[in-house]
Every structure is written in C-alpha cells, then in structure tokens.
Amino acid sequence: MTALPDRPHRHDTTETLKAALARTSADARRYAQTGPKQYEDACHAIADQFLDELQARGELAP
C-alpha cells in the first residue's frame, strides 16, 4: 500500500470538508451503537484526516 500525501484533502473547499466531517461523525456514532467496530474505526480515521486539514487551514483552534 502506498503512503498517502501529507494533505490529501488540500484541494477540497472548507465547506465541503466541514460537511464531510459532519457526515462521517454521524456514521461513526451510528457504528458505535450498532457495529461493526472496524467501520467505526474507519470513520474515525477519515474524520481525523478532515480535522487535520481544517486545522492546517486555521479553521479550528489548535
């Protein structure tokens, strides 16, 4: 498996990232209640990428 670039979402708009983060977080909450655990973990990993990009843009507090 190849390594991801440092900022795979750098070309997405801030609004798109925030919407995707909201959807991914909702999915993670749903999987936390219903399972399977690996789906919840995957959602959290994706949400972390969105958060990292938003923080790099200065959209979130450090």
Image: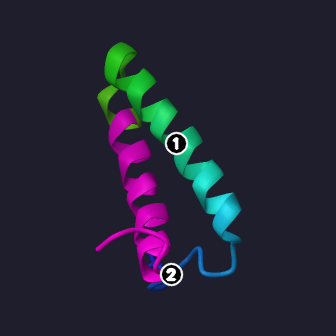
Return the residue nearer the eye: 5 or 55. Answer: 55
Q: Which residue is mark 1?
A: 24
Q: Earlier in the sequence, mark 1 or mark 2?
A: 1
Q: Residue at x 38, y 14 (%)?
A: 34
Q: Position of residue 15 (x, y in %)?
A: 69, 61
Q: Is residue 50 magenta?
A: yes
Q: Secondary structure at mark 2?
A: loop
Q: Residue at x 59, y 56 (%)?
A: 18
Q: Which is more foreground, mark 1 or mark 2? A: 2
Q: Residue at x 52, y 42 (%)?
A: 24
Q: Is residue 37 magenta?
A: no
Q: Position of residue 54 (x, y in %)?
A: 49, 70
- Residue 44 to residue 36: above or below: below
Circle 2: is it few (<14), some (14-19), or many (20+) Cα within 10 Å?
few
The amino acid type found where label 2 is placed reads Arg
Q: Residue at x 49, y 72 (%)?
A: 59
Quadrant location, the N terminus: bottom left
Quadrant location, the C terminus: bottom left
Q: What span is colored magenta in the figure? A: 40-62
Return the residue nearer the eye: 19 or 41. Answer: 19
The amino acid type found where label 1 is placed reads Thr
The rendered magenta stretch, by its main secondary structure, is classed as: helix
Q: Position of residue 12 (x, y in %)?
A: 69, 72
- Residue 55 to residue 20: above or below: below
The outermost residue toward the top is 34
- Residue 44 to residue 6: above or below: above
Q: Which mark is residue 57?
A: 2
The outermost residue toward the bottom is 6
